[in-house]
Amino acid sequence: MRVSILVAALAGVISLSAAPAMAQAPADLGKFSEACRGGEAFLLGQVPAGTDSAAILTPLCSCLTNAFKDMSQKDIDMLAADLRGEGTDEAHQAHGSYDKLTELAREGLNNCFAEPDVAAAIKAAEPPPAAPTAPAAPQ
């Protein structure tokens, strides 16, 4: 009788360990994407007058959303708050691993700026150089 109980218990343990681990639910990136598209100053800094920032932010935010898709909802929400200018020192401290998050975010941002479609968008969005002015005619 004891052997059958032991076999049944062992079979239960084996079946549980063979089951795939419960995956974390993917983060909702909707608010992050929205904050990203509105995060010109945060992401691009000062841009020359006449620069089409939306043309840069579209591929950049798409790349960032893809780069951050496996992050936790807590991390995504913190990054979105930062993009909206709502990230406070208190929120950063309460996050628990904000330094690691900013490191990952910086790495993702640098990688996205290096992507060919983002680099091409940056080049295409720059305003054309001003036409040289002709010298004034002598009087």
Image: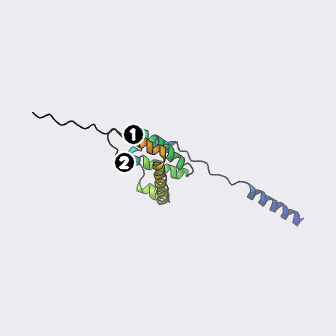
Residue depicted at x 53% and y 44%? 29
Answer with mark 2 or mark 1, whichever residue precedes in sequence.
Answer: 2
Residue depicted at x 48% and y 53%? 105
Determine if residue 40 is in view.
yes
Residue depicted at x 42% and y 51%? 87
Left/right placement of residue 62 relative to residue 13 reads left
Q: Nearer the viewer, residue 37 or 117?
A: 117
- Image coordinates of residue 20 in percent, x first then y, are 71, 54
Left/right placement of residue 74 relative to residue 24 reads left
Residue under pointer 1: 125
Q: Quadrant of the N terminus?
A: bottom right
Which numbered disc, 2 or 1, marks the residue closer to the eye?
A: 1
> Which residue is outermost to the right?
1
Number of callouts in the render? 2
Residue depicted at x 39% and y 47%? 44
Residues packed near mark 2 inside 10 Å, few (<14), some (14 to 19) or many (20 plus): few
> Which residue is outermost to the left?
139
Q: Is disc 2 placed on a helix, strand or loop?
A: loop
**Residue 36 sits in which quadrant?**
top left
> Which residue is outermost to the front?
138
Residue under pointer 2: 45
Q: Is disc 1 placed on a helix, strand or loop?
A: helix
- What's under tag 1, amino acid-wise? Ala
Q: Nearer the viewer, residue 101 or 7?
A: 101
Q: Is residue 1 above or below residue 52?
A: below
Q: Quadrant of the C terminus?
A: top left
Residues packed near mark 1 inside 10 Å, few (<14), some (14 to 19) or many (20 plus): some
- Image coordinates of residue 14 in percent, x first then y, are 78, 60
Q: Is residue 16 above or below residue 85?
A: below
- What's under tag 2, amino acid-wise? Gly
- Image coordinates of residue 102 in percent, x first then y, are 46, 56
